[in-house]
Image (spheres, rainbow, N blue to C red):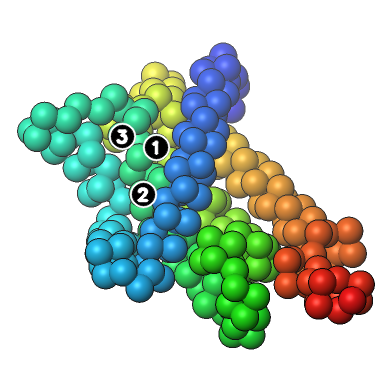
Amino acid sequence: MSQILPFLPLLLNGLLITLALTAVGVVITVLVAFAAGLCRMSRRRWLSWPAGVFIEIFRGTSMLVQLFWLFFALPFFGVQLVPFAAAVLALGLNEGAYGAEIVRGAITALPRGQREGAIALSLTPYQRMRYVILPQAIPAMIPPFGNVFVDLLKNTSLVSLVTVADLTFRAQMVRATTGATTAVFGTILVLYFVAAYALSVGMGRLERRMDPGRPELRPTLLQRLFRPGGVVGS
């Protein structure tokens, strides 16, 4: 273990790169998940069909192959991505495809009466989604999204194969220098676990804060309209 102590700052610097990859990847994942999930539910085939193809391709193929395509194959089509951009794009698109099914599942799981009530109030599709459906569906999405984000964090170890100097890349450098394989990979095992555990705890706290049973949460539009003293209840 004493062999790798001088290299600990190098490993911690790699951990910062890993956390940056995770943070940017999470943002892309959420954006892709909501865009693809909502398009998949659309009645317009020119939206639902491409979204379905995207989801099935990115869920049905290896993230490593997708990463190699973005970094090594796209230049043959005139598109050159820097390693960090290729890495976060592969992470975001792959995990976003899984997230899209979470979005779709949470929305379709809502009672049908919520949509029917919103339609009866002559709300536009945007208003129904913004004020009635999403406020109830998002709390149900948080636990599975937490799993997706932890999976994204662990998959950042693949980006070392396209020369991104993340934690795994730095660990391989230290191992090649010191030969202390067990100590090096034992150390990064602990670092990955701590990062994943912190992310899980954060998502757990967010889940509790978004619990629909919390009295301080703002009610949805339908709940405000139909409660005593509301527009319909008055």
Q: In which quarter of the image is the C terminus?
A: bottom right
In the foreground, 69 or 27: 27
Label 3 element class = helix
The image quarter in which residue 52 lies: bottom left
Q: Say the numbered circle drawn on residue 157.
A: none
Q: In the figure, is residue 45 to the left or right of 123?
A: left
**153 relative to 226, above or below:** above
Q: In which quarter of the image is the N terminus?
A: top right
Q: How many residues crowd mark 3 within 10 Å: few (<14), some (14–19), many (20+)?
A: many
Q: How far apart are marks 1 and 3 (CA)?
A: 6 Å
Q: How many residues crowd mark 1 within 10 Å: few (<14), some (14–19), many (20+)?
A: many
Label 2 element class = helix
| Residue in the picture at 53% in, 61% down | 126
In the foreground, 23 or 6: 23
What amino acid is at disc 2?
A: Leu
In the foreground, 41 or 201: 41
Q: Say the numbered circle drawn on residue 88.
A: 1
Q: How far apart are marks 2 and 3 (CA)?
A: 11 Å
Dot 1 and dot 3 residues touching (CB under 8 Å): yes
What amino acid is at disc 3?
A: Ala
Residue 123 position, x and y percent, is 59, 69
Q: Say the numbered circle drawn on residue 93.
A: 2
| Residue in the picture at 35% in, 73% down | 43
Q: Which callout, 2 or 3, points at the residue further toward the start of the chain?
A: 3
Q: Which residue lies furthest to the left in this view?
A: 76
Label count reads 3
Residue 179 position, x and y percent, is 41, 26
Q: In the figure, is residue 140 to the left or right of 226?
A: left
The image quarter in which residue 141 lies: bottom right
Q: Which callout, 2 or 1, points at the residue further toward the start of the chain?
A: 1
Q: Say the numbered circle drawn on residue 86.
A: 3
Q: In the figure, is residue 115 to the left or right of 172?
A: right
